[in-house]
Image (cartoon, rainbow, N blue to C red):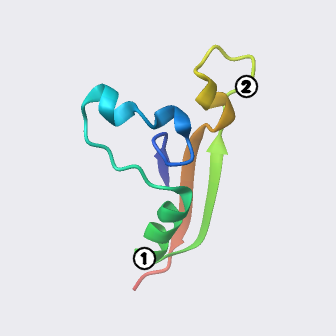
């Protein structure tokens, strides 16, 4: 399982690399699936954990949330 907040579909994280002056690898949801598949995982699933609307957090956490990609290692 991999969790990521900085992914392409989350516009709230688009500026993080520049603002923090830290190189970051920003991948799309499909790219995460492709990485898992290429590494030998199967039954790949994704879900986004979002905060409740009433939570006092940045809006991206409510709209997009953290992306989790999970799979079963089928070996090589």
**In the depicted structure, whether residue 1 falls above or below residue 50:** below
74 in relation to 65, above or below: below
What residue is shown at x 45% (from left), y 37% (from top)?
A: 14
Question: Which SS class for mark 2?
Answer: loop
Q: Residues within 10 Å of mark 2 (few under 14, many from 20)?
A: few
The number of callouts visible is 2
Mark 2 = which residue?
52
Horizontal and vertical percent position of residue 75: 43, 81
- The percent coordinates of residue 49 (x first, y second) are 64, 39
Drawn side of residue 13 relative to residue 22, left or right? right
- Please tell me which residue lies in front, 57 or 68: 57
Camera-side residue of 68 and 5: 5
Residue ID at (64%, 45%): 48
The first of marks 1 and 2 along the sequence is 1
Query: Residue tagged by mark 1?
Result: 38
User: Within 10 angstroms of label 1, few (less than 14), some, or many (20 or more) residues?
Assistant: few
Q: CA distance from mark 1 to mark 2?
A: 34 Å
The quarter holding residue 27 reads bottom left
Question: The C terminus appears in which quarter of the rendering?
Answer: bottom left
Residue at figure coordinates x 74%, y 17% from the top left: 54
Is residue 24 shown left or right of residue 28? left
Residue 30 horizontal/vertical position (percent): 55, 63
Q: Which mark is residue 1?
A: none
Say which quarter of the image contains residue 18.
top left
Q: Nearer the viewer, residue 30 or 38?
A: 30
């Amino acid at each position: 399982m991999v969790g990521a907040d900085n992914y392409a579909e989350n516009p709230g994280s688009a500026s993080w690399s520049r603002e923090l002056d830290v190189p970051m690898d920003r991948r799309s949801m499909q790219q995460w699936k492709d990485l898992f598949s290429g590494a030998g995982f199967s039954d790949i699933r994704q879900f986004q954990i979002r905060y409740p609307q009433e939570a006092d957090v940045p809006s991206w956490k409510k709209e997009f949330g953290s992306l989790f990609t999970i799979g079963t290692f089928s070996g090589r």
